[in-house]
Image (cartoon, grey):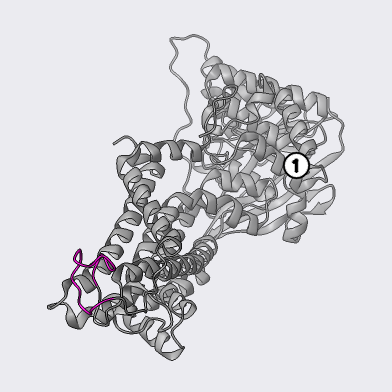
Amino acid sequence: MASQTSLLEVKDLSVAFSTRQSSVDVLRQVCFTLCAGEILGLVGESGSGKSMTSLAIMGLIPKPGGHIKAGQVLYRGEDLVGMSDTKLRGLRGAKLAMVFQEPMTALNPLHTIGRQIVETLLLHSSLSKKEARNRSIELLREVGISSPDMRVDEYPHQLSGGMRQRAMIAMALACEPDILIADEPTTALDVTVQAQIFDLLRDLQQRKGTAILLITHDMGVIAEMCDRVAVMYAGTIVEQGLTAQVLKQPVHPYTQGLIACLPESRLSDAEPLAEIPGVVPALDSLGAECAFSERCQFRTQQCQISPKLRSVLHADEHVAQRLVACHHPISLTDSLAGAAS
Amino acid sequence: MKPETKTALPSPMQQALRMYLRSPVAILGSGLLLLLLLFTFLGPMLYQVDPLEMVSVPFTPPFTDATAWLGTDQLGRDILAGLVNGGAMTLAVGALAACLSLSIGITLGALAGYYGKGLDLLLMRITEFFQVLPALLFAMVIVTLFAPSIATIAIAIGVVSWTGVARLTRGEFLRLKTLEFILAERAAGARTARLIWRVILPNALAPLLVSATFAVGAAILFEAGLSYLGLGDPNVWSWGRMIGDGRQYVLDAWWVVTWPGLMIFLTVLSITLVADGLNQALNPKLRDR
């Protein structure tokens, strides 16, 4: 288990997109912490704000329109939200690095992968060009690219998807960042390649102690990879805790619904797949009520007011914090019963 | 081209060069352009006749007098000598004006496309202002206000012809800045200046290169037009000026205007063919034709 010093603390982060006429909150009071050396999974449906969270941390919210309304992103105690551009640029790439979803479009088609890694290195270190080149060959070897001294001079279009993603990871790791944000790093790849990339990420995390924020929509990936998991729904985090515990005993009705949807959670193959009734509400139609209340079977009068993320105590939990944003969290016994029914 | 050592894979630019060399149109255009450049820059050394000197009877028709093979003009000056010496001015003004219009166009287009919003609005209104100005008239005003010289003529042409480049650059920037590798560069800590000039601009270069080549052709025509109207540099010999001077005699002595006209035609044609070849080589959609 990873050490408990928190590296990145996201506190009540709210992001809005506004046009002249209206403003839509895409993130509402997102809170989580990333500890040194751990893998935190951020899971949710498309449009739930996973990618926006990662962009907000990096200070890369799409402009014009997007802005951070409130909240803090503390990196080693320093707030990234109000930080000057120059200072933030120094952190990006050096301390906070990112791997994108589409390895096909996330590399500059005009430059060799070697040159792109070299340039990242030169931006943040005082290496000479020669040293940077040697380092980039070394990095390519580390991420498992065969004959890296040849590959270093190849262009992105000459590499396969998996290779490109490895090159992206090499680039992200170039300056040995503390935090690696991986935004659906395998969504565009074959299943077999997916497994290789995850092995690589976990291997790197264990060897270098890099904390990883892994964004995915795949519960299977979460179960496989993450120490802790945060579940997002309609721009906010609804449940957070140790992966094994969240998956075994979901406390939030939405998490429970998500897990019930997995084909593996059926008792037999003949049983139809479970689903959560209704659809994700449009972000611009959300009021003060709990975003999940429309689809929730436990809804009451109380749910007119959106619940805050709070700690729930489990009988067997002393170490890890379990957080949930619900007025009617499923208790431990209910949870087990719910998963079985 | 470079020899195939190890398993060297071609860079995008090398591939484009290969495509370019495979196109007959491009070969023809570059060959013609090369000949014209040799004619203009080696010609004066090989054919040392003063273009302002009277060498024979005025209005000697071509191919009749061994001292002036292409005939003489109204003052008995050798037309071949004129052609040999008039090219440098035409090409220099063409190149200078194209450089200027590209610098203005790319800078403004890049800033408008990258920053968007208010700056984009402002710069595009300025562009539209220059677009609706009658270009030739405006250039004439500039040249008349300042004494005509290579520099002022090039500036005048450059200032009136950058709008197309600016719009093209802006469009490319609008397209490219949304791509993920731009975001990836920012995530790696790249500065804005680096993003604009080192990352986005090189990716927009293919259509700009084509448009630059066309711009040279257009600038040459423009210079010829200004000289024809008597607004050229009076101290420098040029093809446009030869046509301008000879235009009154076109019915009696066709050759006085025809030879320089042919030179301008061939120059612009060769440049257009080169541009076409570049377009085919650099535009992946046209490549497979």
| Residue at horizontal 71 percent and vertical 52 percent from the top | A12
| Residue at horizontal 34 percent and vertical 40 percent from the top | B285
Question: In this picture, which residue range is highlighted in magenta?
Answer: B56-71
Q: Where the C terminus of chain B falls, by quadrant?
A: top left
Left or right of residue A46: residue B275: left
Observer-nearest of A20 and A336:
A20
Magenta stretch: includes residue B58 = yes
Q: Position of residue A164 (x, y in %)?
A: 59, 29
| Residue at horizontal 42 percent and vertical 56 percent from the top | B38
Dominant secondary structure, magenta: loop
| Residue at horizontal 74 percent and vertical 54 percent from the top | A88
Observer-nearest of A135 and A101:
A135
Look at mark 1 in the image and give the residue it sits on: A121
Question: Outermost residue toward the bottom?
Answer: B145
The relative height of residue A330 versus residue B242 in the rendered view (above or below) is above
Left or right of residue A323: residue B228: left
* Mark 1, secondary structure of its residue: helix
Left or right of residue A6: residue A84: left
Question: Outermost residue toward the left?
Answer: B251
The relative height of residue A319 versus residue B195 in the rendered view (above or below) is above
Magenta stretch: includes residue A179 = no
